[in-house]
Image (cartoon, rainbow, N blue to C red):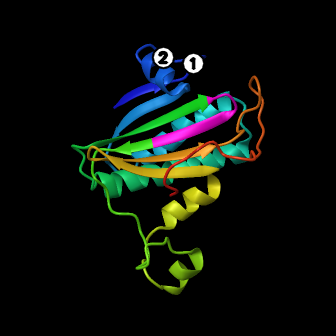
């Protein structure tokens, strides 16, 4: 496992990544596709957010999203094959925080109804259509915006949290008029 944790700025070696995206890399780690690693990743992300002064309830939300995204990556993207790994990256731009989880496999296709739309919670509860997809529903409910992308044999889930950190180290939460995040919704 390789881990880089924020310590007042970008760690050496990740400056190019941060500069390319306009974001500071707060945390980056590569984990083996093994059950239990999602808990360790969740704890690490939580510690970084606590250092930034993010309120405990928002830290809990991001930790939950981290765990769900990691579970999706290790189960669906990597097929629980410990020879494969997934990567967790936490980025900050101003007051916003973005979580990216990238797996080493093609992943399972998104859970959709026959008409191509995502099922609602009510449909899943009734057993109408797919019975999977709880993790993505939870992620969508806790993040301001999220994207699920596939490229070059990888699946990347990106969850955006708006105004998680106020200027300096303080904390806050709010939704802007426009999210500034585009792409395929989770």
Residue 124 point in image, percent of width and height: 51, 79
Q: Residue at x 75, y 22 (%)?
A: 168
Circles 2, 1 touching at the beta carbon (< 8 Å)? yes
Secondary structure of the residue carrying numbered label 2: loop
Which of the 4 image quadrants contains residue 47? top right
Circle 2 crowding by C-alpha within 10 Å: few under 14, some 14–19, many from 20:
some
Residue 22 point in image, percent of width and height: 55, 25
> As drawn, is 133 to the left or to the right of 76?
right
Q: Is residue 73 above or below residue 111?
A: above
Q: Residue furthest left?
A: 83
> As drawn, is 109 to the left or to the right of 69?
left
Q: Which residues are magenta?
A: 93-100
> What quarter of the picture does the N terminus occupy?
top left
94 magenta-colored: yes
Whole-angstrom CA distance, mark 2 to mark 1, is 8 Å
Q: Main secondary structure of the magenta part?
A: strand
User: Disc number at residue 11?
Assistant: 2
Q: Residue at x 47, y 41 (%)?
A: 100
- For disc 1, the marked residue is 7
Residue 139 point in image, percent of width and height: 56, 56
């Amino acid at each position: 496992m390789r881990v880089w944790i924020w310590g007042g700025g970008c760690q050496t070696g990740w400056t190019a990544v941060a500069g390319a995206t306009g974001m500071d890399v707060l945390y980056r780690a590569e984990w083996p596709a093994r059950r239990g690693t999602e808990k360790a990743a969740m704890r690490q992300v939580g510690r970084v957010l606590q250092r930034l002064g993010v309120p405990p309830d928002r830290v809990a939300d991001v930790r939950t999203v981290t765990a769900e995204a990691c579970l999706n990556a290790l189960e669906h993207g990597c097929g629980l094959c410990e020879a494969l790994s997934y990567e967790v990256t936490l980025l900050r731009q101003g007051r916003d925080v973005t979580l990216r989880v990238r797996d080493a496999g093609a992943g399972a296709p998104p859970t959709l109804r026959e008409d191509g739309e995502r099922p609602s919670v009510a449909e899943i509860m009734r057993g109408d259509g797919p019975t999977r997809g709880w993790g993505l529903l939870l992620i969508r409910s806790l993040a301001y915006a999220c994207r699920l992308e596939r490229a070059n044999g990888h699946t990347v889930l990106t969850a955006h949290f708006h105004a998680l950190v106020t200027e300096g180290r303080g904390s806050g939460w709010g939704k802007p008029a426009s999210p500034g995040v585009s792409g395929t919704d989770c």
